[in-house]
Amino acid sequence: MKTAKNDTKAPAKAPKAAAKPKVAFFDFASCEGCQLQITNFGELLLDVLGAVDVVEFREAISEKWDGDYDVVFIEGSIGDHHAEERLKKIRARAKVLIAYGACACTGGVNGMKNSFELDEIRASVYGKDYKLFDSTATKRVDQVVKVDYYINGCPIYIPELVEVLKCALRGLPYTVPDNPVCAECKLNENVCMYERGLACLGPWTKAGCNSWCVNNGNICYGCRGEVSNPAKNAGDVISKYNLKPELIKAKFDMYNKCKEGVK
Amino acid sequence: MTENIHIENSNWRLRKGQIIAAKQMTATEKWFDIKLEDGELDHEPGQFVQVELFGVGEAPISICSSPTKRGSFELTVRAAGRLTKHMQAMGKGDWLGIRGPFGKPFPVKLMTGNDLLFVAGGLGIAPLRSLINYVMDNRREFGKVDILLGCKTPTDMLFGDEIKEWQKRLDVNFSCTVDRTAPDWKGNVGLITSLIPGVTINPEKTFGVVVGPPIMYKFVIAELLKKNLPERQIILSLERHMKCGMGKCGHCQIDHPKNYYCCKDGPTFTYEEVKESKKL
Amino acid sequence: MNYHILMKGELDGFVKKLAKKMKVCAPVAKGHNNYAFEEVTSAAEISMDYIPTILPPKKYFMPPREKMLDFDISEGKPKDAANLKAEPLAVFAVHTCDLAGIQCLNMVFSEKPRDYNYLLRKESVFVIGLECNKYCDSNASCALVGNHYPNGGYDIFFTDIGDKWVIHVGTQKGEELVESMGLAKASSADMVALDKVREGKKHAFQNEIGVDPKKLPEIFAKGTESKVWQDVGNRCVSCGNCTNVCPTCYCFDMADTINLDLKTGSRNRTWDSCQFETFAAVAGGENFREERANRQRHRFYRKFKYPIDKFYRSFCTGCGRCTRTCMAKINLKDTLKALAAEHK
């Protein structure tokens, strides 16, 4: 693998960079935790850098690029007019746009803003002069620009990012798994959270994360979004384990409030 | 019962084929002529192959050429899924992996000496062409031949040049219809079922071979039954997602009391065999 | 009549000796009355008294994800190769329901065109069965399908007769192992004790649904339009738990993975489930099993109808895993009872 292994300069300046696809990372309203995941790639990072030329990446590179991008990664949700304009400009320069992370793909926790009347929430955050601060309801990236690929999750699951990147580099579609997380969790032989007496969102949440959280002792928080055709009668699941439907709904709202769209 | 199992002979191994000719037929359909590096495909009319594009995936595709054509075989591919969309960009010189041929062919031997009525809807002409061209090349072995062809619009018609040849032949009756017309279209307009009443059938010695989208079968079969064609003389080629071709992966299993796997027990069936299916 | 014995106190020595010869996998407690087959090196790690594991031992014969082919497209013409080195492995304490499950899969994958990956793994697994002297729990229906007694499918087979296990040797490989371990022959008193255990099971295990299993094919033949399927379909979550945990579900998907060099990669087989929405969909958009009711019905027919016609045996082993794992209370015994009740 040709990488910048022995190169002390930023990877973007690696010698053979010219022929490789130009890739840039941008962040909007988010914790930048997904960028952090990428810097935590470990050895895989070297393989990825062998395949692409990273031209913008705020958490790792200070240089700016003024040409067009082959692939851009967008992190974060869109919460004001300025962000919306900036995103549209990036899209205009990008051949392929990948939304990554729950904030970008489904609105993520930022979507909870939409549970309130906008002026009410602005006032509570910015005080009586809230009108001086630009703020809109939370939007997913695809509510502003066309998205070519989605990498769901909070944070993203690195093996999935690599799969999507390979698809993007080869012009192939990537289909986000649309089966419940249980489908993968069972293969990992985890003891079902419901049997531990915990309400887990696995039965309604899109798989693709290899049940990462449950493997590590957590419940599924629904960060990858709801499957497109959830069970018609989830009450049966809930009643088997003596749980209240409101509890499940409230848990789901943490990551999925944007699902209801923007008024 | 220990035996030597040589993994290198795995049934998942692929034969390598090279595209020797390709032609865009319509906006979404492309035709390929493929030569295998290790010899003939050795298929029979109605069979299919698994086409592998390394790193993209695999998909089942009907063989659209007759086995009477030697040296290479042909596929017509509609851009519908991951693999078939990717194939649209491929052309002469490109390599692909091939497994097969798979599936039960059309019952050519049983058809010998009988009249044949071919009914093709849309892309159904592709698998049927493997049989039609076989019949053309062995024309003396068969009785009267009628070909009915239906497609959405005149520009969706596949194998246009070849169809013109069929139209010219004196030993074949050919009719064609389109769902929606176009300015320069002088032929029939309407569903393919509208062509059937006009065909004379001797139910005792006719095989009806019907290939088209699932929606078409119900109506065409009803018309053929009206003509007193026995159920076992109506031959269909069913569509399912045949992933392994070996009767194992489960994807192509038909909801039928007989537990048919479309890849092994089909894709060709008599209507008598599959009439109890939930969906054709 | 080749029976040996192993004293209970000697199990640890047996496991340790075996682990020196090959990798040993056995049921291990995971908490909350869940168990899983995992690699062990001593008896202390093993739960000899366990209810069926989360995944059945099929995972050793047909792993959830398995490489079937390597490929290389770096030079114009593609190259491919099938590679598999199956390491010798002993699966220890396999219940009779799971032995039956392995037998079912053996039939499927030995049928031509044969599956070389499966067959190669099968040859490398040493199977040690373990008899259940009582029900694991009320979800099992092994007596219905006759799997509460051993019906072959093992190299050696353990039955608990109190302070020791009687070990039946089923194969030459088993004979060699027992000899190398120096296990004593069973005495006539041991054989009497074994008979007594078997006799006791006649009363302990009874047809769990009160329906003659010989009638099931007919009940299923007439049950395609039953409202039972609507009922289970309305509850189903389509999570695939029931098929993933089933010892005889073997449906799979194939997909390509390419490495970051975009030149080399592999074709991989993964477990698939007929309960997933797109399982029977074709690229053109048609979905031949779109409704959950149809998919659930399909699952039951693939246990109780189709395999009986094709292989002359039930592909339900009675292990009860699908009922235990279902998120929506779909219960196999209740479903069969409801279907049979409609038939009357």
Image (cartoon, grey):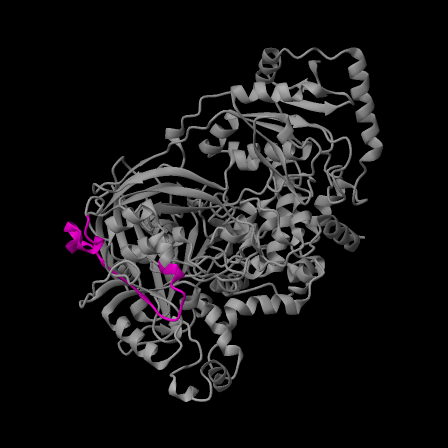
The image shows residue B118 at horizontal and vertical percentages of 41, 57
Toward which corner of the image does residue A18 lie, by quadrant?
bottom left
Which residue does the image show at 34% across and 78% down from the upper left? Answer: A84
Q: Is residue C317 left or right of residue A108?
A: right
Q: Nearer the viewer, residue C319 or C186?
A: C186
Toward which corner of the image does residue A64 lie, by quadrant?
bottom left
- Residue B14 visible in rendering: no
Q: Is residue C197 left or right of residue C15?
A: right
A237 in magenta: no
The image shows residue C291 at horizontal and vertical percentages of 58, 61
Q: Is residue B269 above or below residue A147?
A: above
A16 in magenta: yes
Q: Is residue B26 left or right of residue C138?
A: left
Which residue does the image show at 63% across and 34% down from the upper left? Answer: C27
The image shows residue C219 at horizontal and vertical percentages of 73, 49
Q: Is residue A204 left or right of residue C221?
A: left
Q: Is residue B269 above or below residue C82?
A: below
Q: Is residue C187 above or below residue C336?
A: above
